[in-house]
Amino acid sequence: MSQDILNLWLHDEHVGEVERLRSGRPRLRFAAEARARWGDGARVLSYSLPLGPKRIDGPAIETYLENLLPEGALRAQLERQNGVRPGDAFGLLRHIGYECAGAVQLTPESAPPTGHLKPLPDDEVIGLVEDLPTLSAPEGEAITASLGGVQSKLLLTRTEAGWAWPAAGAPSTHIIKPEPIEPSAPIPRIVEFEHWSLELARAAGVPGAKSTLERFGDRLAIVVERYDRARGDRLHQEDFAQALGIRPLEKYESSYEEPGRLRRVAIGPGLESADPGLFRDALLRLVTFNLIIGNGDAHAKNYSLLLRDGLFSIAPAYDVAPVFYVNPRFSDFGMSVAGQRGLRHITLDHLMREAASWGMSEDGARTEIRNVATSVQSALVEVEVPEFVAPVAEQVRAAAARFAG
Ligand SMILES: Nc1ncnc2c1ncn2[C@@H]1O[C@H](COP(=O)(O)OP(=O)(O)O)[C@@H](O)[C@H]1O
Ligand SMILES: [Mg+2]
């Protein structure tokens, strides 16, 4: 087992290996079997990394690996726990690449990891959640899973017998994010807002991750079902940052990018989908929902694509919350909509122009936007609005009316 090779598995198949060069930089080589099976040019791993004979060393592979990892303080904590130099993505993935977003796994071993589930008594689960933001593993186990994002979270597997720890590459099924304990949290009750937003999305016909609110000892948490796991299988996904080759630190679009990121998705992976028209409709519906709900955190790592046999579709909504309506400081939409990123300024007209730039007809775009807006209006009646959410729901209602036109 070399210190400097990580095997790359996709759906348990060997698709390539990442080597750490003497310079410290990673280099990806696709496996001959994967190239023979899928053909050169196939984007089965990532839109930004088509299969091919050439070794890839440079920003494309560096950025892809960075985007598999947690960000900020979470990443720093995992680096410390594993004795990995800050910023060494390859080194950290050696420890935590066994379970990632989608169907990809990175391991130093030369056989695909199968892993095992370790049943967890309730008090142990409570302990793990209560420890957060300190990341810990049950006695005798290690953290071997990696997901993007900055909120501290726990990845567990729900079995008929209760929660289990997915060890050494066993698939997790749920993401548990407790309400942060920092007294200066910019959005108090964020997990409740997130749960309400996901319920609202689904009630409005916008596909969204399924969630519940659950108490673990003295911590309230949102428990989100992984849409990239199904009965023990992994479905592949990547976030927009991976698809477009954007580093995590650049996840918020800058004002002067041309073409804009949404357009790049619509005319990139969007054209490599089973039905590009439906892909654009789904993208527009999700963007419309995020605008209406005041999601001032809808950056390139909070949208994902599902990949199946080289064909792309829009993943369900996740990590959505009306942060702009709770704290107006969160006014950056994260993505440019016809050149505008400020949530105070993006209008129906911007959204129509953005959709036109993807090749959508005026009527088609109008229909999708209006449909989401009116569905949100009805969903606001159907979904229970907790008292503390009421002022926010009022702002959502007003935005829905604006986008309904
Ligand atoms: N329901 C889900 N199913 C599958 N993957 C998810 C789901 N929710 C989030 N993810 C993945 O996990 C990452 C982190 O989750 P997220 O809720 O965005 O955390 P954070 O609040 O820290 O940004 C996401 O960027 C996405 O890749
Ligand atoms: Mg996120």
Image: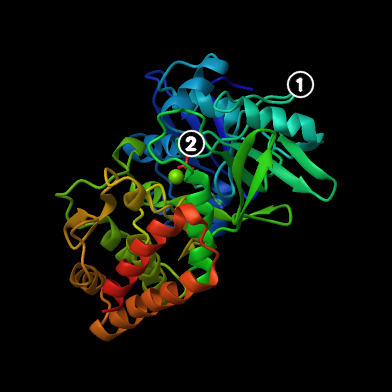
At which x and y percent is residue 298?
36, 52
Residue at image coords 76%, 41%:
163
Q: Residue extending furthest bottom?
A: 363
Q: Residue extending furthest right?
A: 161
Residue 2 found in image quarter: top right
Q: Name the residue under label 1.
A: 139
- Of the 4 image quadrants, the one containing the C terminus is bottom left
Q: Is residue 204 visible in the rendered structure shown here?
A: no
Q: Which of marks 2 and 1 is in front?
A: 2
Q: Residues within 10 Å of mark 1 (few under 14, many from 20)?
A: few
User: Is label 2 within 8 A of ligand 1 (CB to nearest ligand atom)?
Assistant: yes
Q: How is the image coloured?
A: rainbow
> Which residue occupies the foreground of this view, 330 or 116?
330
Indicate which disc residue 271 carries.
none
At which x and y percent is residue 200?
49, 65
Residue at image coords 70%, 33%:
217
Q: Is residue 369 visible in the rendered structure shown here?
A: yes
Q: Up-down: is 83 above or below 261?
A: above
Q: Name the residue under label 2.
A: 151
Q: Residue extending furthest left?
A: 256
Q: Do the residues labelled 2 and 1 touch (CB within 8 Å)?
A: no
Residue at image coords 37%, 47%:
241
Q: In this view, does 41 lie to the left or right of 156?
A: left
Q: Up-down: is 302 above or below 339?
A: above
At which x and y percent is residue 275?
44, 76
**Which secondary structure, mark 2?**
loop
Quarter holding ligand 2? top left
Please name the amino acid that badge 1 sits on.
Glu
- Of the 4 image quadrants, the one containing the N terminus is top right
**Which secondary structure, mark 1?**
loop
At which x and y percent is residue 273?
44, 69
